[in-house]
Amino acid sequence: MDERGNIIGIVSAKLDASAALAASGALPEQSLVLGIGAARRVPSWNASKDRFVPVMEANLTLSFDHRVIDGGAAGRLLMRIADLIMHPEQL
């Protein structure tokens, strides 16, 4: 696949998002790389139930070139992606 001209890359790893970003070194021309880790079941405190409940969680990591993309915009993009993953019916 020819990757020239792309500005965004998405990589995934079976373990975590930092491993995914480590693989992004193969994408040197990318201005933005989103790393998505594997989902796993973890305990989360539920105040209304006054106890821990199991939830699915995955790490998202965003790496971007500050010369090309503003940090605030990148943060808003990451929040939007997280929101869409939590609420896929919005797609």
Image: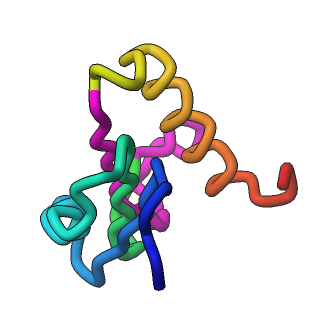
Observer-nearest of 89 and 29: 29
Picture quadrant of residue 64: top left
Residue drawn at point x = 49 percent, y = 37 percent: 78
Magenta segment's dominant SS is strand
Residue drawn at point x = 41 percent, y = 24 percent: 69
Q: Is residue 12 left or right of residue 81?
A: left
**56 falls in the magenta region:** yes
Q: In the image, residue 41 lies at what x, y percent?
A: 39, 73
Picture quadrant of residue 76: top right
**52 falls in the magenta region:** yes
Q: Can residue 73 be seen in the rendering of this structure?
A: yes
Segment tinted magenta in the rendering: 45-65
Picture quadrant of residue 39: bottom left
Q: In the image, residue 79 lies at what x, y percent?
A: 53, 34
46 to 72, vertically: above or below: below
Observer-nearest of 54 and 40: 40
47 to 66, vertically: above or below: below
Residue drawn at point x = 38 percent, y = 64 percent: 36
Q: Can residue 40 be seen in the rendering of this structure?
A: no
Residue drawn at point x = 50 percent, y = 20 percent: 73
Q: Quadrant location of the C terminus? A: bottom right
